[in-house]
Image (cartoon, coloured by chain):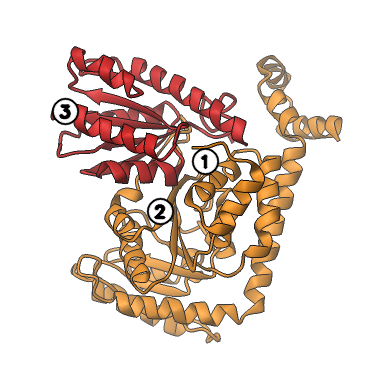
Chain colours: A red, B orange
Amino acid sequence: METGKNQSLFNGRPIKILLAKPGIDGHDRGILVLAKAFRDAGMEVIYVGLLPTPEEVVDTAVNEDVDVIALSLLNGAHMTVFKKVADLMKARNINDIAVVGGGTIPEADKPKLEKMGISGNYGPGTPISKIVEHITERAAEMRKLKSMEE
Amino acid sequence: MILLKLDELIQGIINGDRRSVSRAISIVENEQVSINAKKIVKEIFANTGRAHIVGITGPPGIGKSTMIGNLSAMLSGTGRKVSVVAIDASSPFSGGSLLGNRIRMQDSLTRHGVFMRSLANRGLKGGLSRSIWDTVKILDASGSDIIIVETVGAGQADLDVVNLAETIVMVLGPGLGDEIQAIKAGIMEIGNLFVINKMDLPGAFIAQKDIEETLAMSPKGVWKPPVVGVNSLTREGYEDLIREIDRHGKFVKKSSDLAFRKFRAELEITIDEELRSRFYEEIRAFLSDNEKIRNLMEKKTDPYSAAENLINSLA
C-alpha cells in the first residue's frame, strides 16, 4: 500500500490539515484550489465550509487532531478573526497544532500575525509549491512535538 | 496540547476527555501498528462493548453524511452520547484525501457537541479504513452510547462494514435501478435496515416498493429488515428510522452469533496485520531497492517466485 510521499517523514500518517474561512467571507475559490493542491501533495484535507466560528475551527482541529490549521480571509477581518483563533489556541494550551494564514493581507500586518504565531500569510499569486513547502515544514515541527508525547 | 504520558492518555479516554480520545485515534491511525497503539487497545479493551455500533453505507452522493448530521442531532437531543466516524477515500496517486463528510454535518455537530472524526481509507478496499476497529474501541471506551460509522461511498462489493457494525443501515434512493439490481448478491444482502432517502424526489416510492418486494422474497430470518423512507431536508421519517435502529440494537445485543462472528473477523484481520508487521521493514526495504527489482524484471522472474524467495529469506 503506497500511501503518500511523506510517509517516512510523517511516521506512517500523512499530514492532516484543516482549511477554514472563519468570518463573514464567501470568497472560497482560493481555499478550494488549495484544498485540491494539498490533497495532490499527499495530505489529508478537511474543509469545514463557509462561516465557521473561531471556536468551531479550534474544536474541529482538536477532534480531528490536525497538524496545521490554514486560515484564509479576503474580507480584511484577519487581524480580528485570526487573532481570535490564536487566542483560543493559547487559552486551551494547544501548542502542537500550527496556524498558518493567507488571503489579502497587507505587508504591514504580516509581522503582527507572525508575532501571534500565525505564519505564511501568503497573498494572491503565491506559487502553490511555496505554500505546500511552508505547510510541510510547519507540520514537521508539530509532529516532532507530538512524537515526544507518544 | 500539554504533554501527555501514555497512561494519562488511557485514563483520559476512559474519562471521556476529547483531547485524549482524539490523540489516541491518531496513534492507532498510523500505517504501521505501533507498540503504543497496541498498548492503548489492550488497556481499554475491558471498557469496550457497551456502545451500539451503527454502520451507515450506500452509494456515493446518496446522502449518508447529511443523514448522520440529522441522526446525531436527534439522538443527542434524547440525551445520548453520540460519536461519529466518517471514512473517505484516499487518492491512489498522491495518497492525499479530501475528507468532505464533515461539511454536511457541521451544524449538528457544533450545536450538540458531537465528537466526529474523519478518516481516510489509505487505500484499503472494502469501504473502511484499517484503523477503524481500534478507533471504534476508543470511542466505545470513552463512554459513547452510540457510534455511527459512515463507510466510503460503497460499491456492490464493499462489505467490510458487516464485520464492524452491529446494525447496518443501507441508504438508497430513487433512480438506482430496478428490482433486478436489488436482488444482486453483495451489498444488498448485508443491510439490517433499508432507508430510501430523498423521498421528495420522483421515483422514490417506486424504489421503496422495489426494495420491499425484494426483501419479501428473501428467506424469512428472525430479523426482517424494515424499509424506511425519509426526507433529510424536513427530517420526515427520521423518528421511524431511529425507532428501527434502536429495535435492531436490542435485537443484536441478545445475539451471541454476531458477537462471535465480529470477534473472529477482527482476529483474522489482526493476525494478518501482525504477520505483515513482523516483516514490514524488510518488505519496505526490498520494495524500495529499485535496482534489485529492475533486475528481477529483466530476468523475467515471475512475481510468485520473487515473493517466495523474499519471504523464505526472512523467515
Name the residue carrying label 1.
B122
Indicate left or right for A114 with A8 as reference.
left
* Element under disc 3: loop
Q: Quadrant of residue A120?
A: top left
Looking at the rendered structure, the kind of residue marked 1 is Arg
Indicate left or right for B260 with B108 as reference. right
**Labels 2 and 3 share a subunit:** no
Residue at the (70%, 48%) spot, across then down: B39
As helix, strand or loop, the secondary structure at mark 2 comes to loop
Query: Badges 3 and 1: C-beta atoms under 8 Å apart?
Result: no
Quadrant of res B13: bottom right
Chain of the residue that carries numbered disc 3 in the rendered image: A
Residue closest to the eye, B16 or B309:
B16
Q: Disc 2 versus disc 3: distance between alpha carbons?
A: 34 Å
**Does residue A31 appear anywhere in the picture?**
no
**Residue picked out by circle 2:** B153
Give yes or no for contact between labels 2 and 3 (Cβ–Cβ under 8 Å). Answer: no
Of pointers 1 and 2, the one earlier in the residue sequence = 1
Amino acid on which disc 2 is placed: Gly
Label 3 vs label 1, nearer the camera: 3
Outermost front residue: A91
Residue under numbered circle 3: A74
| Chain under numbered label 2 | B
Distance between mark 3 and mark 1 Cα atoms: 34 Å
Amino acid type of the residue tagged 3 in the rendering: Leu
Report in which chain the residue with disc 1 lies. Answer: B
In front: label 2 or label 3: 3
Toward which corner of the image does residue A97 lie, by quadrant?
top left
Mark 1 vs mark 2: in front: 1
